[in-house]
Amino acid sequence: MDLCNIATVRKLMEKYGIAAKKGYGQNFLINPSVPADIAEESYSYHMGPSGGKSGSVLEIGPGIGCLTCELAERYERVRAVEIDRGLIPLLGETLADYPNTQVINTDFMKLDLPAFLSEHFPEGKISVCANLPYYITTPILMKLIEEGEGRFDSITIMVQDEVATRLCAAPGDADYGSVTASVHYYGNCRKLFKVAPGNFLPAPKVTSAVIRIELYEEPPYHCVDVETLRRVIAAAFGMRRKTLVNALMASFSDIGKDRIGEILVELGMDIGVRGERLSTEEFCNLANAFYEERKK
Ligand code: SAM
């Protein structure tokens, strides 16, 4: 069954009495080369030139199953989490030839992720591959990164091109933001290719892009307390027009403006610097210094 053929997709939707739900961000891929390319980018990073079915992958939002099939052709174990109950019987048909694949009908955001991973992937590294619903891209990504407990080696996802640019931006770039700085603590982001709106049904208004986040085994900069890092980054980008000292005062007023200024100088930063110019290493250094300061 060609799950990217418009006529097939329409026939399946008619058969199961479903329509694409805007509220769930349902834009289904209709060009077969796109899911094949996404799956290959994911698999080749996860397994290298291994040959044969191997490895484990988690998909979020299988939809009609076109990317799921491509993953099931490559990976030994595929688990796909789909929120839309109406798609489950349809997926039963489209994935019938893949006993290595299981669909779990739940809201990814409500999952106890560590428990889910232990149950479905008892051992080994897992890759994540998905054409993400755009209404909830950042929360899904942050949940994967923050709750994955080191189980994921890579996250290959389709997102809006604008989001892809933001995630792959460098300090000082106009697109560099709090999500960029947070994600860069955990891994390296690579923009792989763009996908035009005409490749989806229904066509979204914006261009999409596939990125791969290659997660570090150990973050290169050690942060003693990730919660403090989160707060430092949020404060630094929360008040973009202010200098970093003033922006940080909003969340770390107990440390005091003078001491915050001293800490910046001790860390070799310019007192008038703005948050959007700081690298991940500098954010880590600041978070570690604030954490120690509060222990005094
Ligand atoms: N993978 C399919 C494809 O590429 O054609 C569908 C991708 S579509 C952009 C996003 C999918 O994510 C839909 O199937 C939607 O129902 C599902 N979805 C949306 N929110 C979700 C959530 N919170 N948890 C799990 N799945 C979700």
Image (cartoon, rainbow, N blue to C red):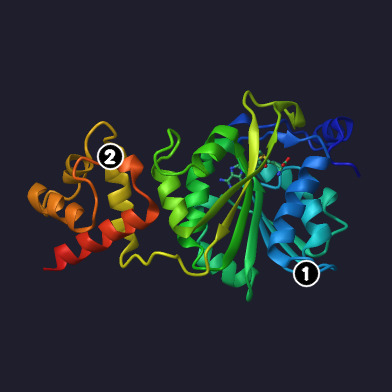
Q: Which residue is mark 1?
A: 54
Q: Is residue 147 left or right of residue 87?
A: left
Is there any visible trace of residue 212 in the rendered image? yes
Is there any visible trace of residue 89 in the rendered image? no
Q: Is residue 248 left or right of residue 156?
A: left
Identify the element where label 2 is drawn. loop
| Residue depth check, mark 1 versus mark 2: number of the one nearer the observer | 2
CB atoms of marks 1 and 2 within 8 Å: no
Q: Is residue 207 left or right of residue 75?
A: left
Q: Is residue 111 above or below residue 181?
A: below
Q: Residues within 10 Å of mark 2 (few under 14, many from 20)?
A: many
Quadrant of the drawing holding the C terminus:
bottom left
Q: Position of residue 239 (x, y in %)?
A: 26, 35
Which residue is at 18% across, 45% downward?
Answer: 271
Which residue is at 44% across, 65% downward?
Answer: 220
Task: For marks 1 and 2, give the CA distance.
Answer: 46 Å
Which residue reaches farthest right? 1
Q: Position of residue 146 (x, y in %)?
A: 45, 59
Which residue type does callout 2 highlight?
Answer: Arg
Q: Which residue is mark 2?
A: 274
Disc nearer the start of the sequence (1/2): 1
